[in-house]
Amino acid sequence: MTPEFTPKLFSILRQGISKETFTKDVLSGLIVGIVALPLAIAFAIASGVSPEKGIITAIIAGIIISSLGGSRVQIGGPTGAFIVIIYGIVQQYGMDGLTIATFMAGFIIIGLGVLRLGNLLKFIPYSLIVGFTSGIALIIFSSQINDFFGLHISKVPANFIDKWTVYFKNFDHINWYAIIIATATVIITLYFQKIIKKIPGSIVAILLATIIVKVFNLPVDTIESNFGVIPNNLSMPSFPKIDFNTVQALIQPAFAIALLGSIESLLSAVVSDSMIGGKHRSNMELIAQGFANIVSSLFGGIPATGAIARTATNVKNGGRTPIAGIVHALVLLAIMVILGPYAKLIPMSCLAGILIVVAYHMSEWRQFKSILKGNRMDIIILLTTFFLTVIFDLIIAIEIGIVLSSFMFMKRMSDAVQIQNISTENKSGEHLFDEELVDLPKEVLLYEINGPLFFGAARQFQETITNTHLQPKVIIIRMRYVPMIDATGYQSLKEIIHSYKARNIHVIISGIKEGLKKDFEKNGVFLVLEKEFVVKNIATALEQSKEYI
């Protein structure tokens, strides 16, 4: 097994783990497991599924991601990023549809890892990531208004605008007990760790809120009133009946889950690398994420990925190997078995407060504000992705965002490609060429191409070279700084050669790299241009051009 496809845990076990490191990992895993509990429950409820689905996901996916992943400290489980997609799938296709979509997404993620595409995901523009992440944060915030204010709306619309319309119509039904509990939860979650660092504020808030509501019998919604009892055991793995039409309809959401999960897990791995000075194996990480989603779906779980906040918590508490992630999952399993029946008493307004804190941290408003001051293209991508996520659909936002980013990239690349004509009358570009070219004959036109000759620049290339009022006897196309040519570029090159040959003008290509010379053969350039007209350097090209002057 190559190092690229070897789980980090296997490599670390071969090297050996010291007793001190193991102890720190166990303690860190214990803390992260406690932190993960309220988040797992809250993410599940916000996604439109029952609370235990989140815990099951954190247990199953957490163990697999830590055992097989390519990061030393990654913590896997449900995250806020998936809430929007999961909610939409569950509303339209039910829990069976979500299971099928998650199952398919797992195989897609594995495919990305096997094909070594992990590194490519890092090239998705940051403005796009901030755009949909901020959009998701706003949607999460909006989804918690009902429970935060205790409005007791039985069915909240999924659409952002419709949701707020319903809220404004029901603000006269505010439950002040719910508001006080939710506000106190936000304050405790944000500030408690400044007093005691090792104890998560969210757990303190849940314990206090649950005890107060139970003792004083406060009239607020709880998990029990909305969802019933939380099971204290894992169900046996099962898979729903597969209907081809449903599978076909779920392909698009499955790709969205796969792409979103891959991006977030690798972002989390990169962040953790910077914190511990390590280097993750991106493709192995994707394969582990894929397996985690496949197995989690079989146990009735929801999509999972690397969780940036929990991973950072792991690092800050001393976790340095995947042992911490495995312990975190086992702690959650123990809590589910022992304390599962008591979790039903947690107030919904308390979970709403926790999710609003999550939305705040997820919003990346500082980065959002920073990008708005930057490049116009980045601003367009940011705002387009943000508004599409909020107003329409996350899947549409990701698709259009990637397409828009691709067009922006091609525009920048085509702008970067320089195609310059140098003649005895044009001295402005002489610095690009050798001194021997100062006395270039008038019968010879020389063009220098700098940059990749791909489809985004092919039109500019063709128009620049063919739209000349001069009637030379020889045209030299110098390509020493051309790293690659795609199919469109080759087609344009062949059309240029054919056009000039039809006018009895000789074309000489100079300075191409050896790799490109082989591609010339494959792409049929030598069918329109004899091999002797493709030369190694400009001196040879000039010498050869003298024969035709």
Image: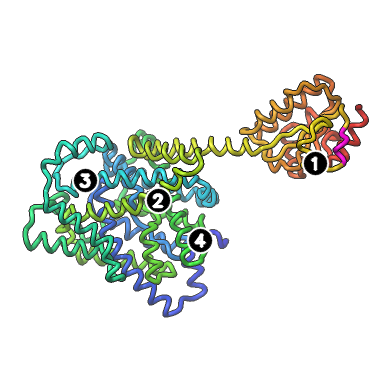
Question: Where does the image place residue 281, in percent across and percent down from the top left?
Answer: 52, 59
**How far, Cα to Cα, is label 1 from label 3?**
66 Å
- Mark 2 vs mark 3: give the one in front: 2
Answer left or right for 129 relative to 355.
right
Q: Is residue 488 above or below residue 297?
A: above
Check the image and report above or below for 192 versus 126.
below
Which residue is drawn at the image coordinates 42% and 79% (left, top)?
A: 20
Q: Say whether residue 437 is magenta.
A: yes
- The secondary element bearing badge 2 is classed as helix
Q: How far apart are the alpha carbons under marks 3 and 4?
A: 39 Å
Q: Is residue 423 visible?
A: yes
Q: Nearer the viewer, residue 337 or 536?
A: 536
Cα separation, mark 2 vs mark 4, equals: 27 Å
In the picture of the structure, the residue carrying the numbered disc 2 is 366
Side of 515 relative to 211 (left or right): right
Disc with the residue nearer the chain's start (2 vs 4): 4
Q: Which residues are magenta?
A: 436-440
**Residue 102 appears left or right of 495:** left
Q: Quarter holding the N terminus?
A: bottom right
In the rendered image, which quarter contains the C terminus?
A: top right
Horizontally, is 63 left or right of 481 in the view? left
Residue at image location 8% in from the left, 56% down from the top: 218
Q: What amino acid does circle 2 point to?
A: Arg
| Position above or below: 211 against 443 | below
Q: CA distance from mark 2 to mark 3?
A: 23 Å
